[in-house]
Amino acid sequence: MVADTSSEAGTPRRLRYSVRGLANWILDYADELRLTVTNMALNKLVFFAFEKTLVQRKAVITEAKIEAWEHGPVFREIYHDFKRFGDKPITTRADFYSVETGNVEVASVDMERSVEDFLRSELKPLIHLPAARLREISHEPGGAWHQVWCYDGHANPGMEITPRTILQAADEKGRCDDET
């Protein structure tokens, strides 16, 4: 899908990539590197792709909802598509029912080259890490997952990690980094 490049000042632009297509792109990238990825690792890698694209490029890469689950950020679509693999490497790709063709099709993304290059660069140091380490990184105190999971205020139905939460966590981390 082509990106929506319109953006008001301070409002992230919306790339609107399919979360399943993005997951498949990451799985393909892992294959290129001769790596395997589990469901838990894939959910974290898609989250980091979302987070890094939002914070560094001021763009929302997918409209899919991110939830704070016990083991970190989760995209329900990805979790359910691959839960049959448990903690074993994923060997298939996410698919969807196309109303246009009436068939089940493998999800894909028509990603802008600059976004693809950016994601390769940002995910390369992470994609080889075990799921447990990616979980630790996603649980960083003060991070978006931590702020939602350890929330001590009004209700947060669905334990949603919003773009606003991610940007606030990054801003707070930036201020702390500036002070050291």
Image (spheres, rainbow, N blue to C red):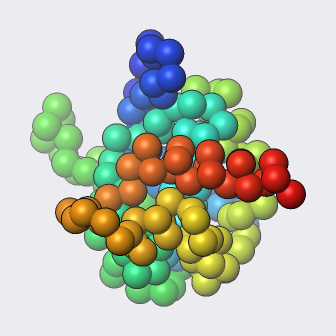
Residue 11 appears in the picture as rendered: yes
Point out residue 105 in the picture as x, y percentages from the top left corner: 29, 47
- Viewer-closest of 175 and 97: 175
90 vs 155: above or below: below
Residue at the outermost right position: 180
- Viewer-closest of 11 and 44: 11
90 vs 100: above or below: below
Residue at (65% x, 27% y) in the render: 113
How many numbered tags mark residues here? 0
Residue at (68% x, 64% y) in the render: 127
Residue at (41% x, 86% y) in the render: 86
Point out residue 90 in the picture as x, y percentages from the top left corner: 49, 73
3 relative to 152 in the view: left or right: right
3 relative to 105 in the view: left or right: right
Asked where in the image residue 154 lies, by quadrant, the reply is bottom left
Residue at (57% x, 31% y) in the render: 58
105 vs 132: above or below: above
Residue at the outermost bottom position: 87
- Viewer-closest of 7 and 38: 7
Asked where in the image residue 69 lies, by quadrant, the reply is bottom left
Residue 110 appears in the picture as rendered: no
Asked where in the image residue 62 lies, by quadrant, the reply is top left
Q: Point out the image quarter for the C terminus.
A: bottom right
- Viewer-closest of 127 and 135: 135
Q: Point out the image quarter for the N terminus.
A: top left
Point out residue 170 in the picture as x, y percentages from the top left corner: 61, 49
